[in-house]
Amino acid sequence: MLIRIRTNVGLWRVELPDGGSSTSSDILKAIAIGRPNVVYEKPLSFDPGCANPINPNISLAAQNLTHGSMIHCRVDPTTTLEAKPADDMIVDSTTREKDHQHIYIGPACNTLITRRKILPDGTIQLIHENSVTDGKGKNLGFRKGMLALRDMKMHWTLAEFTAMDAQFTFQIKRQEEAWTENVSLDTASCNNFQNYLRNFKFQRQRFGYLYGTYEEGGDKKIKVKVECIYEPPQEVIPGGGFNPLPDDDEDKVEKLASMLGLKRVGWIFGHPPREKGFQMSSSEVIMAAELQLEAAEGVQPTPFVTIKVTVADDGHASFEAFQMSKLCMEMAAEQALEVGPKPGFCYVNETFTAIQEGKESETVDNNFFLTLVPIVQHQSKVFLCEFPFANRDLEMRQTKADLKRQLAKSGSQGWDFIDLLSDFSLLLYLSNFLDFDIDMPKICQSVIHRDIPLDDGYKLIISGIAGLEGNY
C-alpha cells in the first residue's frame, strides 16, 4: 500500500506491505529506514495544519486511509537527510537496508553522509554527518535546511540553477477576482452562530464548518449555498484565537451531510472588533488556505469560501466572505507561510523568498492574499436551525429534553413531524440512538425528498427517544 506524506520539506512516499493491519507506527518505521534522525514537529495527521492527528492505535484501513492516500506532518528540515553510505565505507548485509526504496519528491532533497568510526574496544559505529553546516554553525546550504549546490550535483548550468532557485521564490501579486460568484448564507444558521458569540460580547473567537451545495453561476463561476453550520470541538486561546481539537464525530458529520445531499463548502469564524483594514490574522489566513487545499485536493481553483463575522460599531453583526488566492494556496502548500509577532502579516519561511514590489520581503500583508466574495441571504426551504449546536459550553449541551421540546410542536402551528426533524444538529444528535448506516439514510431520504414519507415505525421510535406520546 502506497502512502503519500506531505511535509514542509516536500512529498515523501512509503510502501507498506500490509494495508489492512498497518498503523501510523508502521509509516514512522518505514520513514526511519531512510531518514533515521528525523524529528517531527507536528505528528502524522489527516489535515495540512496537523490539527487532526492519525490514531496510532487503530489500523490505517479503519481510518479510511487506503492506497494512494495523502497525509501530512511537519518535520525539522535539518533532521530529514537521507541515510546513504559513504564511498569509503564497506557495507554488508547487516548494515544495508535492501528495502529502503523511499522516493523523495520536492526541491529540498537532502543527503545524509554516513561514515564508520572504530571505537577503542574495536567495535564499529556508524556516524551520520550533516553537511548543511560547516561544523561551526555556519549554513553552507543552497538555502536553509538544504545541502550546498555541490553536494546535490557536481556541475550546474545557469538554466538549472535558475530553475532550482525559482522553486523557492514567490512573486507577491494580488488576485483580483474570486473563483466564486457569490455565497448565499442561511439566515437562521448565521443568526444562531452570531448570537452565541454575543454571549461573550464577541470577545471569544469560534469557528465552524459550512455545509451546503455548489450551483452553476454565470461566466463559468460557481455559486455557494450554505444550508447549515457544524461547530467541531475547539478550545479558546487566551488573548485571542482558537485551537481545533480532535473530533470523534468528524466522519459521522461528513457522512450525514452526504446523506442530506450536502458537502463542506466553507468555514466561518467570529472574532472581536479589529482596527480598520485588519481583516484576517496570519493564523486564520493559513488555516483558510489549508482548508482550500484540502477541498481542492491540491493547488487548484475551488469554490470553498471563508466567512468571518464580528460586531460593528452600531452593534450589528457584520459578515464578510473571502477566498484565499492561488498564490496563498501555493505558499501554504510548501509551508512557506508562518505566524509571526505581527498578526496582520504572514511571515515567510527563511528557506523561501518573497518578492513584493520588486524587493525581497520577510513578510506579506495578509490583505494581498484575500479575494472578496459577494454575500447574499436566503432562508433554507429544507432545514431548520433550532436544535442546540454540538460542542458548545456545558450549559448549552444537547439533551433529550431539547429533542422533546422541538418535536412536541408537531401537529401545531402548521408543523409536521418531518419538518421539525429536518435540522442538521438534531439529526446528528439523533444518530447517537439509531443505527447510523441503516436508519439514518432512510430518515435523511424523507428529509430531502418530502414525497418519500417517513415510516411510522421511525416516528414511533424517535418519539420514544424524545419521551413523547402521539406527537407525530
Image (cartoon, rainbow, N blue to C red):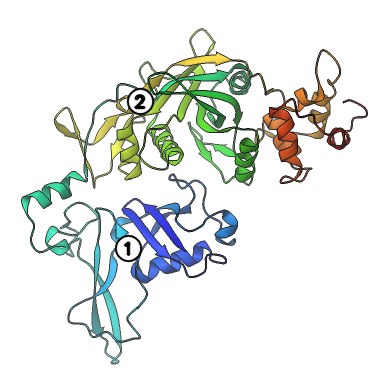
Dot 1 corresponds to which residue? 103
Q: Quadrant location of residue 125?
A: bottom left
Q: Which residue is mark 2?
A: 370
Q: Looking at this view, name the residue that lies furthest to the bottom.
A: 122
Q: Secondary structure at mark 2?
A: strand
**Which residue corresponds to the image point at 35% horizontal and 18% vertical from the top-left?**
277
The answer to whether 216 is drawn above or below residue 68 in the figure is above
> Which of pointers 2 and 1 indicates the residue nearer the eye?
1
- Indicate the amino acid at tag 2: Leu
Quarter of the view holding residue 463 = top right
Find numbered disc 1 in the image and state the secondary structure of the residue it sits on.
strand
Q: Earlier in the sequence, mark 2 or mark 1?
A: 1
Is 431 left or right of 158, judged from the image as shown? right
Crowding at mark 2 (Cα within 10 Å: few <14, some 14-19, many 20+) = many
Q: Residue at x 54, y 23 (%)?
A: 225
The picture places residue 112, in percent across and down from the top left corner, at 25, 68
Identified at 23% across, 86% down, the residue is 90
How far across and down, in percent of the image, does residue 397 sit?
A: 72, 33
Task: Judge left or right: residue 371 versus residue 443.
Answer: left
Query: Where 27 sits versus 217, above or below?
Result: below
